[in-house]
């Protein structure tokens, strides 16, 4: 059932450019792919491992700038830029994660939040590198062996392909014993240690993988916008990733993906009313959180639990 | 007989309190030893120090002849000491199966590459853990709950599950921190039988308990702590006759104690 809906959703989304020629609709789909992927990366860090990381915003921005600068300043290709985005974000995640994952949960939140703000400052004030508030406009269409992804539907394949790749990797990770160990660390760290497992390498790996996936997503998204400036580090992005994870259910792989697709299209669906759009969005969000405090995934889990209890009596 | 666990002159103080003032003892292979003492005598501090959850001020801990002094909990566990906790620790949102299989995963041959690619080595390790899980769940009588979340269990059942988890990797020694505290009295007998059965199959145990009757029924050797020192060590019968133990532990004078202890045992 889960597999069937996943496969049909995958095929349906993949075939989207054949159904519509509207750049607007496909643009929304690009956002949905990238936001869902970034949210799934946050889900690995926060939902599975229990590390509430605001650093994702910083990784997103660094990924965007790394890709843009590789192309515009250093004359590399878009693809090389994405590789740099992943590498730089991994290195930074390891550097700040190494001390940060040893602190308690509250300190971790503060450290990652401070990091995200710092990245924003760097983007704005290191004018000789980032051009500051002017930003870097005119990011060219990516090119692969002479094939140019110059239209929105063509660019969509990049976002879609990346979403499949990253979500596949996250699926392999989350459903393996590694994923289970991450959840175990979240649930009961002293017990994990008493069972011979060192939590730090697991937390660091989750943080670094989450950073790299978010960074590459940021790189692709920047080239979709065709411009990068400090607004790329607006808290709006962090908030979107977080809302997706919470409504989807922290720690639920499919719940977060479902929420990602819904929550990134919902504001667009609500565009019929420009004035009330965000109010309706807020109300839907509130209702969702009230009805399903554990998100979609938590709700499904509760139902499974209730059936198990009924079976035992 | 060789000592699985040997503790020499363990000292530990918290701000202003000397919790352990030179505790030494050895646990023989295949034995089942009780560690008792009044509240604040240092029982829990001792096992927290031994299992790496507390830093030791001075002293030495040897596990199967290997010096594990000051090693973190995960290193102590890998060296062969598994422990349970006084306030029972489980993965409440995991099934019983996952609660047990995860306890063995650090001890098998499958690395993270095997895990990601689901290699044959990974599948073998998983199958072995699965077999061990069924065996242990059967032993503690929780087989029918194998797919239920641990959170549905009663308190006593949770303690049994924690015991099963500690046994998963066949450790050199299992340290149980109050295995029957808060457990329904009628079920204490069951726990006793389970532990005795495992011990006759060769498993070494160190059991910390408040319940003196449980300890004297179960253990062939008892260590008594008081105010961070070892007060006495011997067979349950010897401990019962020891005047210092009676006074420190039960607050009894030797004259009144003999009859009362007979009743208690």
Image (spheres, coloured by chain):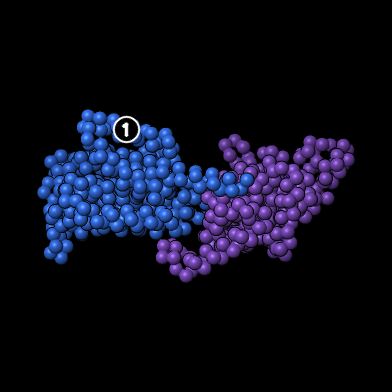
Chain colours: A blue, B purple
Chain on which label 1 sits: A
Above or below: residue A128 compared with residue B31: above
Query: Quick one: which residue is furthest to the left in this view?
Result: A138
Q: Position of residue A80 (x, y in %)?
A: 20, 59
Relative to A213, A173 lies left or right: right
To which quarter of the image does residue A17 belong? Answer: bottom left
Q: Position of residue B5 (x, y in %)?
A: 65, 57
Relative to B253, A79 lies left or right: left
Relative to A176, A126 lies left or right: left
Q: Residues within 10 Å of mark 1 (few under 14, many from 20)?
A: few
Q: Position of residue B25 (x, y in %)?
A: 69, 53
Query: Please, what secondary structure does the residue beneath circle 1 have?
Result: helix
Residue annotated with mark 1? A282
Above or below: residue A257 compared with residue B120: above
Q: Position of residue A36 (x, y in %)?
A: 31, 48
Q: Is residue A222 visible?
A: no
The residue located at (71%, 63%) in the rendering is: B201
Q: Is residue A295 visible?
A: yes
Q: Nearer the viewer, residue B42 or A17?
A: A17
To which quarter of the image does residue A78 belong? Answer: bottom left
To which quarter of the image does residue B117 belong? Answer: bottom left
The residue located at (14%, 62%) in the rendering is: A147
Quadrant of image for the N terminus of chain B: bottom right
Q: Nearer the viewer, residue B120 or A248?
A: A248
């Amino acid at each position: 059932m889960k597999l069937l809906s996943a496969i049909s959703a995958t095929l349906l989304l993949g075939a989207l450019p054949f159904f519509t020629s509207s750049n607007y609709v496909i643009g929304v789909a690009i956002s949905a792919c990238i936001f869902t992927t970034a949210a799934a990366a946050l889900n690995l860090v926060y939902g599975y491992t229990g590390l509430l990381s605001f650093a994702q915003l910083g990784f997103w921005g660094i990924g965007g700038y790394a890709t843009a600068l590789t192309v515009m300043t250093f004359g590399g290709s878009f693809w090389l830029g994405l590789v740099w985005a992943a590498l730089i974000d991994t290195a930074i995640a390891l550097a700040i994660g190494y001390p940060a994952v040893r602190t308690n949960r509250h300190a971790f939140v503060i450290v990652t939040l401070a990091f995200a703000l710092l990245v924003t400052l760097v983007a704005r004030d290191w004018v000789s590198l980032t051009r500051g508030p002017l930003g870097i406009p005119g990011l060219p269409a990516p090119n692969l062996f002479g094939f140019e992804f110059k239209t929105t539907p063509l660019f969509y394949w990049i976002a879609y392909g990346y979403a499949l790749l990253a979500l596949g990797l996250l699926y392999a990770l989350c459903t393996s014993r590694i994923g289970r160990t991450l959840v175990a660390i979240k649930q009961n760290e002293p017990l994990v240690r008493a069972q011979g497992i060192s939590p730090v390498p697991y937390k660091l790996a989750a943080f670094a993988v989450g950073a790299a996936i978010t960074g590459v997503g940021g790189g692709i998204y920047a080239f979709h916008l065709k411009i990068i400036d400090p607004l790329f580090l607006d808290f709006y992005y962090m908030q979107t990733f977080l809302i997706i994870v919470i409504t989807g259910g922290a720690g639920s792989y499919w719940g977060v993906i479902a929420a990602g697709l819904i929550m990134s299209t919902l504001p667009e669906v609500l565009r019929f009313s420009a004035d009330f759009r965000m109010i309706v969005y807020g109300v839907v969000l509130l209702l969702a959180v009230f009805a399903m405090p554990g998100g979609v995934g938590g709700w499904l889990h509760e139902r499974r639990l209730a059936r198990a209890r009924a079976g035992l009596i | 007989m060789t000592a699985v666990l040997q503790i020499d002159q363990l000292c530990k103080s918290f701000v202003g309190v000397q919790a352990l003032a030179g505790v030494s003892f050895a646990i023989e292979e295949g034995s089942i030893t009780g560690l008792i003492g009044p509240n604040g005598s240092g029982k829990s501090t001792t096992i927290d120090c031994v299992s790496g959850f507390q830093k030791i001020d001075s002293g030495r801990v040897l596990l199967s002849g290997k010096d594990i002094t000051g090693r973190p909990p995960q290193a102590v566990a890998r060296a062969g000491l598994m422990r349970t906790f006084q306030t029972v620790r489980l993965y409440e949102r995991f099934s019983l199966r996952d609660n047990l299989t995860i306890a063995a995963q650090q001890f098998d041959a499958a690395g993270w590459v095997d895990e990601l690619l689901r290699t044959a080595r990974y599948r073998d390790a998983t199958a072995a853990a699965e077999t061990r899980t069924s065996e242990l769940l059967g032993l503690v009588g929780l087989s029918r709950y194998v797919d239920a979340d641990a959170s549905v269990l009663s308190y006593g059942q949770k303690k049994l599950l924690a015991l099963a988890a500690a046994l998963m990797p066949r450790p050199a020694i299992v340290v149980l921190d109050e295995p029957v505290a808060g457990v329904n009295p009628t079920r204490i007998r069951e726990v006793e039988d389970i532990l005795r059965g495992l011990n006759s199959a060769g498993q070494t145990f160190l059991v910390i308990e408040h319940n003196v009757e449980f300890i004297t029924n179960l253990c062939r050797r008892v260590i008594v702590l008081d105010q961070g020192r070892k007060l006495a060590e011997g067979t349950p019968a010897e401990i019962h006759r020891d005047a210092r133990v009676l006074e420190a532990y039960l607050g009894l004078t030797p004259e009144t104690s003999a009859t009362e202890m007979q009743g208690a045992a």
